[in-house]
Amino acid sequence: MTTPATLLELHAALAAATGPDEAARAGAQERNGQLTKPPGALGRLEDLAIWYAAWRGDARPAITAPQVLIFAGNHGVAARGVSAFPPEVTVQMVANFAHGGAAINQLSTLAGATMSVHPIDLETPTADFTQGPAMSEAEVMAAIAVGWEALDPASDLLVVGEMGIGNTTSAAAIAHALFGGAAEDWTGRGTGVDDAGLSLKSKVVAEGLAANPEAAQDPLQALRCLGGRELAAMAGAIAHARVRHIPVILDGFICTAAAAALERAVPGALDHAVAGHGSAEQAHGRMLAQLGKTPLLQLDLRLGEGSGGALAIQILRGALACHSGMATFAEAGVAGG
Ligand SMILES: Cc1cc2ncn([C@H]3O[C@H](COP(=O)(O)O)[C@@H](O)[C@H]3O)c2cc1C
Ligand SMILES: O=C(O)c1cccnc1
């Protein structure tokens, strides 16, 4: 599958992507029913293992090659004063990722995941979306291609994360375009803006929608008009993973907003993805509810970088360790199965 060159091609790739392997799902369900535990006693871990088995086409799978991809971008809208931090923090944090000093470095290492960082045209921020589209079609496709091509087809689990000062404003605007309601419903404090900052942010989100009417009509246009390069790259990696049956653990508010554009464009596009955690960013819960996803962890994280997604790799590993490693009642000679 070649990298999509237009948003129409991306849409077509998602529409043509095949679903999970139903024979593997049935095999995993049957195995789950024979394991030495009361039925259902491992709760959501059982559902997780069966979901993963179906997507991998293997009734008794293991995670051996998890991949964490971090994308960074700069945002024209940051000049409106919507973040508690200045835009130069984006490039500084990219250097921190490279030196192993960020939270996501520690969590990726702990999860045994390969991690790579992809800064995208940091010297060229997107256009301020309150004045018109943040990106041209060529720009958004270039960013989507970075994400699409960063996916290792040999990986068996994907977590995507981001760095981009101002990007909770971009994510809020995308969520507002995708799900309607009021700008305030989707706007939160990000890095920690005060009350005046929060009301300015809501106003900027509303202006973004007013300046980009096509965003409310077409979910992939919402990604182009209101997104940032790192959000587009996350969407590209998640879409490619969908085509290749590589399961995804979503991170927080920003990651979920980028992913949500895919699901709204092609229902089922996120069937290969679970929500890693529920962010403290106020609208994340509302967005996950719209997507029908219940987070695995609820730790009040509000960092991004893929941190909550990487942490949740351990939960999925736990689910698969039990599913694939446990003895059946017959094997163990335990009565009652
Ligand atoms: C030092 C630092 C490290 C971060 N790591 C992730 N973010 C997070 O904060 C930013 C979004 O918040 P806002 O929209 O308010 O700018 C993103 O870069 C996100 O990844 C960070 C922010 C800072 C300051
Ligand atoms: O949930 C997130 O992704 C998030 C929330 C606040 C700031 N940065 C990221």
Image (cartoon, rainbow, N blue to C red):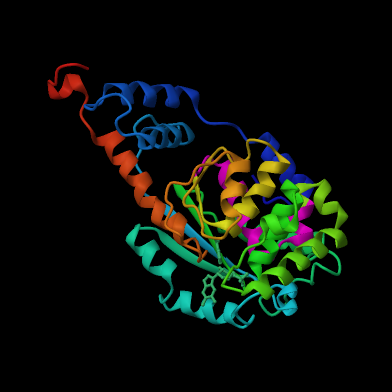
Q: Where is residue 231 shown, x and y percent of the image?
A: 65, 60
Q: Is residue 173 magenta?
A: no
Q: Could you tell whether 165 is left or right of 76 in the image?
A: left
Judge whether 8 appears above or below 337 on screen.
below
Tell me what residue is drawn at x 58 percent, y 38 percent.
Answer: 292
Tell me what residue is drawn at x 77 percent, y 67 percent.
Answer: 203
Q: Where is residue 14 shown, x and y percent of the image?
A: 67, 40
Q: Is residue 223 magenta?
A: yes
Direction front: furthest residue: 195
Q: Where is residue 39 shown, x and y percent of the image?
A: 30, 24
Which quadrant of the figure has residue 80? Answer: bottom right
Q: Main secondary structure of the magenta part?
A: helix
Residue 6 in view in this figure: no
Tell me what residue is drawn at x 28 percent, y 41 percent.
Answer: 321
167 or 201, which is in the foreground? Answer: 201
Direction left: furthest residue: 333
Q: Could you tell whether 41 is left or right of 218 in the image?
A: left
